[in-house]
Image (tube, helix red, strand yellow):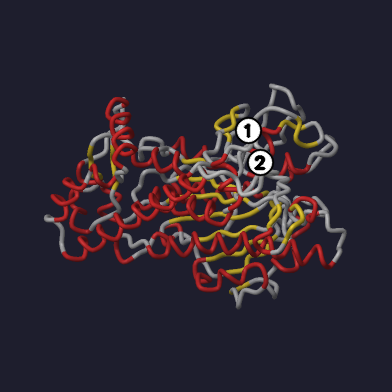
Amino acid sequence: MKKTISRRTALKGLGTVVALPWLESLASAAPATAATGAPKRLAFVYVPNGVNVPAWTPKGTGGKLGDLMGTLSSLNPYKEYINVIGGLTCDKARANGDGPGDHARAMSAFLTGRQPRKTHGADIKVGMSADQHVAQALADKTRFPSLELGIERGGNAGNCDSGYSCAYSHNLSWRGESTPNAKEVDPKAVFDRLFSGTDPKELAAARAKRELYNKSVLDFVMEDAKGLSSTLGTGDQKKLDEYLASVREIEQQIEKAKAASKAPPPKPDIPTPIARDDRYWREHYQDHIRLMCDLMVIAFQTDLTRVVTLPFANEGSNRPYKHIEVSEGHHDLSHHGNDSKKLEKIAKINKFHMEQFAYLIGKMKTVKEPNGTCLLDNVMVMYGSGNGDGNRHNHDDLPILLVGKGGGTLETGRHIIFPRRSDTPLTNLFLALFDRMGAPAKSFGDSTGVLKI
């Protein structure tokens, strides 16, 4: 049975469906969750190669968060929504008799809690990921059960890490034990997916018309938008205008990137096999991440989905960060051998990633929701890596943040430390998140019980 979107929650035009945020004027006509309170959403953001641990770790032995320093300093404006969690372990990222391959195991075990089969053939096997457990439980609630976003492309074949398939180090989300969910790294493709209708003929006609006349998706729904606006209160009219402006801003950024990518590369020695779109985004890494964050927020704001994954890079990524004066590759630097200069550069990379995460959190805080809340009050975003210190390749005491109040179910503003010798499974945290999302499970991966947070 095909899903439909209510006229009260979307604007429609030729090949276009623009879902709307919560509007107080329409609350009585909206689904019960929107009328009585916002739905809960869940996101997982991943960073590769571990962190510079001293620069990451807050001072003190737990309790209420003080001023955040070093890597986490950009999160200070949102401290009331943040939990910094220490002492959690991803045991299945360890060798456990399988030898080297920590990067492949780190990413593939991070959300599954399962030991990946060591193979670089077609017989890959790990397990369903936490995001997909929730997505399947809530599949009938939204147009898209989940969104898998990404920044770096990846393949599912080849030997990427000491005998492990590239599928393991390139995929965060797994629909089943042998089926990774391919991430979408092209912002335009994500935008088109979020704002396209379901009729293939209308979709093709709208795309052709947009390209021929340089039209916006909003041009196709403007008549519907004007009719709706006339029925709204003054506050909702302003909110609708702001929302449509934000959609147009994202669309313009994508159009700008597309135009720039058509230009010939500035240096003839840049390898030609790289697609121009990919080259553009590789050179505008921050813009790429932030556009994907914008699209995540739009998808949550309009309840198009309640589950999103976004890795900032593939595990083991050796991307250089020249824009922050780090010319060496990230993976190479992560094997720092306690060299102070390399550690300083790792900290700069970690801080850059955190600044992009802070951008995402800041965007969420601006989204107004029912009962005087904002999106941050109703979301849970877990940020972290399957490696602790990239030099040690350890998978205990992982760098984990949990941001958002989960619809009022989470106490925040804390530094929570679990005993480092207890090897508390990261999957215990997932069980706690499942409960809050209305998708409880008795066990998941290598869990031993629901984490008390």
> Residue 337: horizontal and vertical position, in percent?
87, 59
Residue 365, compared with residue 294, is above or below; it is below
Tell me: residue 250, above or below residue 441. below
* Amino acid under disc 2: Gly
Left or right of 155? Residue 211 is left
- Whether tag 1 and tag 2 are in contact, CB under 8 A, the answer is yes
Residue type for callout 1: Gly
Distance Cα–Cα, label 1 vs label 2: 8 Å
Q: Position of residue 199 (x, y in %)?
A: 29, 28
Label placed on residue 113: 2
| Label 1 secondary element | loop
Q: Nearer the viewer, residue 126 or 147?
A: 147
- Residue at 64 percent of width and 32 percent of height: 155
The quadrant of the picture occupied by the N terminus is: top left
Front residue of 272/195: it is: 272
Query: Residue 92: in sight, yes or no?
Result: no
- Residue 127, labelled with which disc? 1
| Residue 19 position by quadrant | top left
Which numbered marker is on residue 286? none
Quadrant where the C terminus sits is bottom right
Q: Residue at x 78, y 53 (%)?
A: 390
How far across and down, in percent of the image, does residue 419 sit?
Answer: 73, 61
Disc 2: CA contacts within 10 A as few (<14), some (14-19) or many (>=20):
many
**Going 62% across and 27% down the picture, which residue do you hit?**
178
Q: Give the mark nearer the N terminus: 1 vs 2.
A: 2
| Residue furthest top in the image | 122
Q: Nearer the viewer, residue 439 or 282?
A: 282
Q: Is residue 81 left or right of residue 415?
A: left
Q: Secondary structure at mark 2?
A: loop
Report whether 6 appears left or right of 345.
left
Mark 1 nearby-residue class (10 Å; few <14, some 14–19, many ≥20): many
Residue 264 seen in the figure: yes
